[in-house]
Image (cartoon, rainbow, N blue to C red):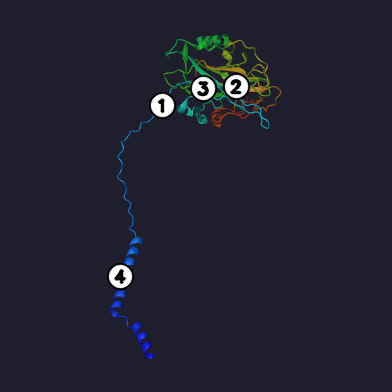
Amino acid sequence: MKRLFKKKEGLVRGVPSAVFLSALIHFILLSVAGGLIVFSVIKRPEKVFVPPPPAERPKTPLIKPRVKMKKNVKPGATRRIVSKQTLGMPDMQLPAIEGMGQGLGGGVGGFELMPDAGDMSIFGGAKSMAIGNDFEGTFYSAAYDRLKKKTNVDEEGFKTIVRRFIDSGWNPTAFAPYYRAPQKLYTTQIFVPTISSEFGPSYFGIPAGPDFDPYLWCAHYKGKIARKDGGRYRFWGFADDILLVRVNGKLVLNASYEEFRNELTAWERQPEDYKYNIGPAQVAVGLWFDLEPGVPVDMEILIGEIPGGQFCAYLLVQKEGEYYPKNREGMPVLPVFKTAEIPEAVKDKIKYDLIDGEGDLDSDLMFNVH
């Protein structure tokens, strides 16, 4: 029994050293080989981005588009647009839009830009400040012909031309043989305190100087007036030298200088004439005229200068039954005739030469159509 136990113990402990060493060497080799295989699979080389070579493309030169634009194209007539009544909404009226089609020359996107009030004169501006309510003024000079050459027209000849204009129903063809300024002016009031007569031509684009004599000239204004509530009215005024007003085809005021008044047209003196002073002389009073509620009527005004020197044209309006405060001479301080609010810049120009109490520039009375 004892011998057998010993023999069995000899079999475990008696493994040959060469076999054990060989097994150890193989184990080490297998471990190293396995590690190399694992690391070779897991560890990958980093990718480096290499941009492709630039592609060659043919260069095409840019061409700026050109648009052929027409110049001095006058817009067609426009209509006043009135919206239909909608439940829960009040009636709204859109005024007629004029001045379309001028492009960037006169506005943006075909619409006229509003003029700067600072560019407006007491005779008006090159563009309207109140489209549809303005009076368009045209300037004529009988001292020059259509080619701007000197004529032989004198004061008597000029008064004959004005009478021909009046007798023809205010037809401007009476001035056709004479010089007409290319610039028209647009105004919403007629009120010119005493100034030098050369300002008339200059405001219509004719430079003052030795090349143009500031006499024997006139300006014809045409427009429409209306009052929502209607009413009965009359004009007061004075001019040095010409101021004539026609409403709905009828002469309602001749406030020309007294020396020329009856030489231009037959005029019946009114009871209130020559009672009050305005400007350098006495005010004339016109005939009453009626306006139906909301109904526009034509109105024309002619102002002018005969011998040169100084010029003025005051046009005031009175509503029947209305009370007006009085100035220091007892004359009612009447509203200045206007069809829209007068811009502050224009008021300042008027007030510079205006005597206090000769007219109300801030009255709410306006004869606007739109």
Residue at the extreme right: 321
SS label for mark 3: strand
Between 206 and 156, the one lying in front of the other is: 206
Q: What distance separates the C-alpha of mark 4 from that of mark 1?
A: 87 Å
Q: Sequence-wise, which precedes: disc 3 or disc 1?
A: 1
Compared with residue 230, is residue 118 higher up or lower down, i.e. above or below?
A: below
Identify residue for label 3: 185
Dot in front, 4 or 3: 4
Residue that badge 1 annotates: 67
Instruction: Give the mark, 4 or 1, whose residue is nearer the N terminus.
Output: 4
Q: Quadrant of residue 224?
A: top right
Name the residue located 41 percent from the left edge and 26 percent from the top edge: 67
* The N terminus, quarter of image: bottom left
Q: Position of residue 336 (x, y in %)?
A: 61, 25
Give the answer, above or below, for where 156 lies relative to 348: above
Whichever of labels 2 and 3 marks the residue nearer the N terminus, that label is: 3
C-alpha gap between disc 2 and disc 4: 124 Å
Measured in 3D between alpha carbons, the distance from the residue under mark 1 to the one under mark 2, in whole angstroms, is: 48 Å
- Badge 2 vs badge 4, beta-carbon distance below 8 Å: no
Examine the rendering and report whether any part of residue 233 can be seen: yes
Q: Amino acid at mark 4?
A: Leu
Q: Earlier in the sequence, mark 2 or mark 4?
A: 4
Which residue is tagged 2? 315
Say which amino acid is labelled 3: Leu
Residue 369 screen position, x and y as percent: 61, 23
Residue 149, given in percent of the width and then of the height, sits at 42, 13
Q: Of tags 4 and 1, which is closer to the observer?
A: 4
Q: Which residue is mark 4?
A: 29
Q: Is residue 318 above or below residue 155?
A: below
